[in-house]
Amino acid sequence: MSKVILETRGLTKRYGGVHALEDANFVLHEGEHVAVVGDNGAGKSTFVRQITAVEQRTSGQIFFDGREVNYAGPLEARESGMETVFQNLALADDLDVPSNLYLGRELIKFNLGPFSILDRKAMRERTQAALDRTAVRIPNLSNPIRNMSGGQRQCVAIARAAAFASKLIIMDEPTAALGVQETGQVENIIRGLKERGVPLILVSHNLRQVFDLVDRIVVFRRGRIVASLRADETDGNDIVSYITGVKGQSDVAYV
């Protein structure tokens, strides 16, 4: 059995009387790509927000790369080697591509405190190398993000995650607002991450995409994990049965 990269035990999040996430036990192994699926409000994004410390969990434990972690915020999670591509992308519209990739981790040429000089040449060269590794084509790196298509913006966000994620990438609905061609480009990037052995959690409503890209599918329903199935040992009808509740809590499946 390969090394466990991420594990949650009894992960729970409550907002007052609302149980958004309840007793989630989840395991991700080294090099594994896992899809998290479920209907709207099933707890998928809540689960991601607890792992990445965007929100603080109500109870439960999180283990990352072999140790229990209690991140104070998403910056600590990122510094530990975990990168996330959220639905809102978290890009700065007025900045160019290198400035977005290195936002918050700029390369310094001369460290003069508040008057430090950035090494823009190095950031541009490393940005191009990161785009090349993920097969992302951006014709003009100096173009502000706001002038780019939705697909280009998404690819920049993914390239940023891929460039700095040393241990895990999490993608929350990365192709939800993209056309067919742009979706294909993002899926090719995900396949490239698989070839490089980078573990991935993919949150998606697109079952065709899920079956094409991942090793295992974890189903959430009403804040609980109700199934964990190998993609090559199940089918779309089975997954939909868990999502809709045709197969319920008494039928919880783990493979």
Image (tube, rainbow, N blue to C red):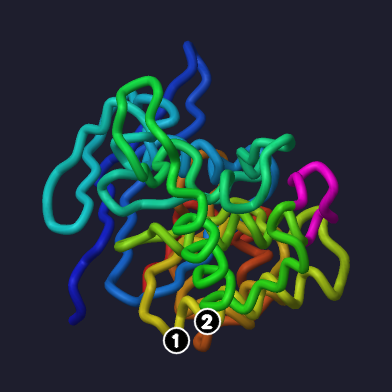
Q: Image point 56% across, 62% down: which residue?
A: 159
Whether residue 237 is visible here, answered yes or no, is no
Say whether residue 181 is magenta.
Answer: no
Determine if residue 223 is in view: yes
| Left or right of 131, for residue 215 | left
Q: Label 2 sits on what residue type?
A: Gly
Image spot of residue 106 (x, y percent): 42, 42
* Quarter that holds the N terminus: bottom left
Tell me how far mark 1 sits from mark 2, CA to CA.
5 Å
Neighbor class of circle 1 (other Cα within 10 Å; few <14, some 14-19, many 20+) is few
Q: Are discs 1 and 2 less than 8 Å apart at CB?
A: yes
Q: Which mark is residue 52?
A: none
Give the number of the disc on residue 195. Answer: 1
Residue 223 rendering spot, x and y as whole percentages: 51, 39
Q: Quadrant of residue 156?
A: bottom right
**Crowd band around label 2 with a 10 angstrom C-alpha radius: few (<14), some (14–19), many (20+):** some
Q: Identify the secondary structure beneath mark 2.
A: helix
In the rendered image, residue 107, in percent from the top left (x then y), is placed at 39, 46
Q: Which residue is mark 2?
A: 192
Q: Which residues are magenta?
A: 143-151
Coordinates of residue 249 in the picture (x, y in percent) = 48, 51
Name the foreground residue: 248 vs 221. Answer: 221
